[in-house]
Every structure is written in structure tokens, then in C-alpha cells.
């Protein structure tokens, strides 16, 4: 590999690392929760039920998630 080829290749490597970091950050923060829900739903629910039921929409998913997270008693004593 010549110096020109390796110099021309560094932007591709840089952007590949940048995408990997962005993907990791989405996983850590839970920003990809809806996509993971859809994958799980299509893998398990749609196959097992065989019904015409549809997965939750993005808004409904996050609304339900927040309700589950914040409903109920939230104190130590």
C-alpha cells in the first residue's frame, strides 16, 4: 500500500469509528429502545401469535415506557 492509498483511506476508517461510537452511545442511552422493541416483536410476538395485531407506534411505545417507569410509589421510606 502506498502512502497515497493509506492517506486516502483514513477518512473511511475515521467515519467507521464515528459510526461505531454513535451506535454505542445510542445503546447506552436507550435511544435505540424502539428499534430493539420492533426487532423483538417481529421475532417473537408476530410469529407466536399469528394474529393481525400490530406493534406499538413510536409515540405509544415511549408513552407506555414512561408510564411504567414513573407510576407507583417512588420513595425509599
Image (cartoon, rainbow, N blue to C red):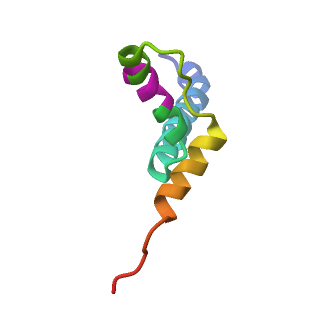
Q: Is residue 43 magenta?
A: yes
48 shown above or below 41: above
Q: In which quadrant will I find the C terminus? A: bottom left
Among the 4 quarters of the image, the one containing residue 7? top right
> Where does the image place residue 23, in percent across and percent down from the top left?
50, 39
Q: Residue furthest right?
A: 59
Foreground residue among 7 and 23: 23
> Which residue appears at 47% of the width and 56% of the height?
68
> Where does the image place residue 58, in percent across and percent down from the top left?
63, 38
Q: Residue furthest bottom?
A: 77
Q: Which residues are magenta?
A: 38-44
Left or right, residue 57 beside residue 39: right
> Which residue appears at 61% of the width and 31% of the height?
11
> Where does the image place residue 16, in percent across and percent down from the top left?
53, 31
> Which residue appears at 55% of the width and 46% of the height?
31
47 shown above or below 58: above
Amino acid at each position: 500500500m502506498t502512502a497515497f492509498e493509506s492517506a486516502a483511506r483514513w477518512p473511511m476508517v475515521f467515519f467507521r469509528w464515528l459510526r461505531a461510537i454513535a451506535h454505542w452511545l445510542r445503546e447506552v442511552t436507550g435511544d435505540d429502545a424502539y428499534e430493539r422493541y420492533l426487532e423483538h416483536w417481529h421475532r417473537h410476538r408476530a410469529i407466536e401469535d399469528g394474529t393481525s395485531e400490530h406493534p406499538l407506534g413510536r409515540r405509544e411505545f415511549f408513552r407506555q415506557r414512561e408510564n411504567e417507569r414513573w407510576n407507583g410509589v417512588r420513595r425509599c421510606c
